[in-house]
Image: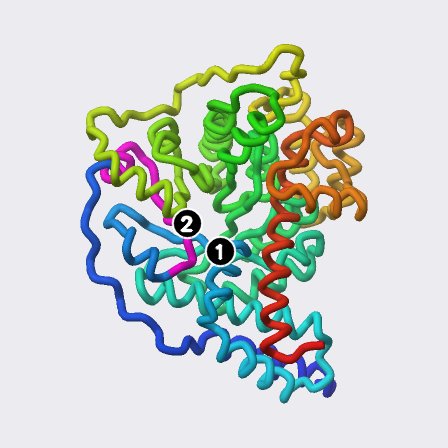
Amino acid sequence: MAAATLDMTRKEALVADLAREVNHPPNRVPEAPSDPGLAKLKQLGTQIWLDTGNLEEASRLWRREMSALTTNNTLANQVVQTGIFDDIIPATAKKIRDIEPGISAEDLIMDVAFVVNCHIALRLVKAFDVLVSVELHPAIGHDIEKTLRYAQRYIAINPDKFIVKIPMTPEGFCSVAKARAEGIPINYTLGFSARQNYLAALLSKPTYCNVFLGRLNAVVADNNLGDGKFVGEKVTLASQYHVRELRQAHHDIPTHQIAASLRNADQMVALAGGDIFTIPPKAVEEFYGQHRKVADLESKLGENYKVNFNEGVDHKAIELLWTVDDKFKKFAADLASRGGTNLTGDDLRMADKDHGTHLFTGFTDAEQHEIKKHGKIPETVRWAGRAPLDDLMTESALQSFITDQAALDDRIKKLAGIA
């Protein structure tokens, strides 16, 4: 074995050991009380996941019906900025430097961030003994090789409880397909339309896919396209229908639909019966406080919510979010026939162009920078005719994660003395 390969193997083993060495691991949280409303949702077929990386917050809100926790770059940054890892970060960086003195600043930051994310997730696993979603560094969202490598690294740390979140980029479809071929559980995140998730399920076969519905309501309302009511709910139910249809028709598709990051208790009621809810603390607290009658909770899987548009709005651009037509199904079937593990992001872009399905935009660096400035909710008029709303929302979400990750990386740089 070459010396460089031996050094890399030693470094990988060290990083894995550091990732597993959680300082002052929490005690197991005592058995939580039951919530009647959550119990009814569970009876209707909905899994309840709590959307926080904060251990204390999770302990306070945890109920017997919950089965998982989710973290992401934003939530991880919130935890890190509390200072809880201010001793661990420099110590971790020093140990990695000791074994690889010439490591680049970029690689050192990525390794330390990986260790920190593992500690956040492992503390949650220790406390609750449930599945925990972990997110990749957004800088590798368009890199198939690195995405697969970090998915492998995460699952090696805890193969029983970790679910790896991969962002919905063209390269992400390929990365997910490769990871799933290795049996790695994947939460394919940052989805905003039924057609995105239809392609994801058929081509990549993720364990989970998402619709971030609150942002869809917000983008319609904030851009004066309509009142924003029920946009995300309608998209989620459409995606749920198509994903479930594929799951039932194909024995090798395990994909379950997540109604992601619900904004309020009303959305929990409006989507009852869906596969999975991820619920931030504010929304679940609201649900607890309302003490809804259990009898009022019923499955909404067959609901056809009406979306109101303002006069003069090109509503077809929004209706695309919940539409999976025959043309798109042909595009997805064509890609699936070629095998997701054999494709590249450029292959997906070219097929999209050839089929005229207009799913992938291919934003320039300047456009990505412009999107980043506007945060999670873009100005749609700027992108009319340039980018479909689902792809625009995915890019906005990814750029938002990049912003939050930069704040986390900056803290690592400062504490680790990285120039």
Question: Which percent across, then down, holds residue 316?
Answer: 65, 17
Q: Report the side of 45 relative to 198 (left or right).
A: left
Q: Residues within 10 Å of mark 1 (few under 14, many from 20)?
A: many
Which of the 4 image quadrants contains residue 402? Answer: bottom right
Please give the range of residues in magenta. 38-54
Q: Which residue is mark 2?
A: 51
Q: Report the side of 291 relative to 355 (left or right).
A: left
Which of the 4 image quadrants contains residue 92? Answer: bottom right
Q: Which residue is mark 1?
A: 75
Q: How is the image coloured?
A: rainbow
State if disc 1 and disc 2 touch (CB < 8 Å): yes
Q: Nearer the viewer, residue 286 or 15?
A: 286
Looking at numbered disc 2 in the image, what kind of residue is underneath it?
A: Asp
Which of the 4 image quadrants contains residue 334? Answer: top right
Write the residue at 27% across / 70% down: 27
Question: Which percent across, then down, holds residue 39?
Answer: 23, 39
Looking at numbered disc 1 in the image, what kind of residue is underneath it?
A: Leu
Q: Residue furthest top?
A: 311
Callout 2: helix, strand or loop?
Answer: loop
Callout 1: helix, strand or loop?
Answer: helix
Is residue 48 highlighted in magenta?
Answer: yes
The numbered mark, 2 or 1, whose residue comes first in the sequence reads 2
Q: Is residue 259 visible?
A: yes
Q: Report the side of 256 relative to 218 (left or right).
A: left
Q: Nearer the viewer, residue 245 or 169?
A: 169
